[in-house]
Amino acid sequence: MRVLVTGGAGYIGSTLVPLLLTRGLQVTVLDSLEHGADGLRCGSQTPGLRLVQGDVRDLDVLRQAAVGAEAILHLAAVSGYPACARYPEKASQVNVQGTANAVVAADGRLPVILASTLSCYGSVPAGFCDEDTLPRPVSHYGRTKLEAEALVLASLRGIVLRLATVYGVSPRLRLDLLLNDFVHTLAQGQALEVYEPEARRAFVHVRDAANAFLFALDRALYSSKRPGGRLYNVGDESQNLSKRQLVERIRRHFPGARVRYAATGRDEDRRDYAVSFARFRAEGFRTEISLEQGIEELVRAFLGC
């Protein structure tokens, strides 16, 4: 069986693709390679892997890449509110039109599993949300991903995975993610400045995020229920915590670390809430990597030990 992974050379994709190959699946990766192909350490010559350099904004390229596939795992995106604010037109084209192209390429026959984000919730006055909470995105990133979700959920076999803030070591490592950035800053011996320390965030390890796609793929292809048009938060309640709590967990590994809690600064996505992950758990999905394991992994990676 062949699957198409858009954005497969990225942070999550470079963790997901080897897992798919290990399962014996044939994998086509469609990626602009804007950040190179080093994340796919398995290499373009790996049996079962076909790497196509191309852009999801090009419908013809996406359609061609989808030939022979039985599912589309759609990870390609301009990710995070800073990048989307810096390149708003590109963000709209990639996140919305690129997703529309994926749905067209699926042609109602293939399941499309979308990587989305808790940033779709935006400001949550109640301080707690689940999938039934009305999304109120406040950033361009959140708005474009919510539009993308609507396109996938309207398709016959669409599944949306709203990922908590992802962290952890990946072949294509990102340092702009909150937890990765905090650990990297302290590992470099630098002072860490944290704004809105009491704001609550939800986190999920990159391997658990990748496993969520494997789980959703299995459900989409093999379950008698075939849950199309479904939306799931991905993470675990044990990893709902404030930024101050997160910093204290990380500081255990850096005695004498310098941390300053700043009075200014604001999260443009207005994230300050706890998240329920009960719906995906009821389907049978479980995360496997604890926050402490993920932090220790990052510390070792950044300290070279």
Image (tube, rainbow, N blue to C red):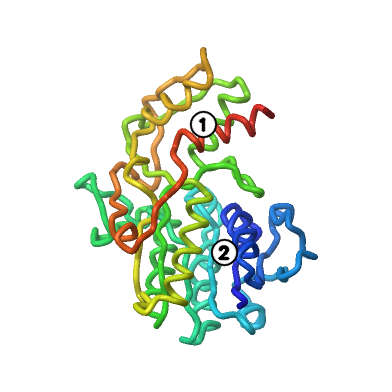
Q: Is residue 280 above or below residue 195?
A: below
Q: Is residue 14 left or right of residue 50?
A: left
Labels in figure, total: 2
Q: Which residue does the numbered mark 2 point to in the structure image?
A: 76
- State the residue in front, 267 or 162: 162
Q: Residues within 10 Å of mark 2 (few under 14, many from 20)?
A: many
x and y percentages locating residue 30 in the rendered image: 66, 69
Q: Is residue 298 left or right of residue 227?
A: right
Q: Is residue 226 above or below residue 188?
A: below
Give me the residue at 42% from left, 54% from top.
163
The reply to whether the C-beta atoms of the residues labelled 1 and 2 are less than 8 Å apart is no
Of all residues, the one furthest to the left in this rendering is 126
Give me the residue at 60% from left, 25% from top.
187
Give me the residue at 41% from left, 62% from top.
161
Query: What amino acid is found at the position of numbered circle 1 in the picture?
Result: Phe
Q: Which residue does the numbered mark 1 point to in the structure image?
A: 182
The C terminus - image quarter: top right
Q: Is residue 47 above or below residue 127?
A: below
Q: Is residue 238 left or right of residue 181?
A: left
x and y percentages locating residue 79 in the rendered image: 52, 55
x and y percentages locating residue 264 in the rendered image: 39, 29
- State the residue in front, 146 or 115: 115
Badge number at residue 74: none
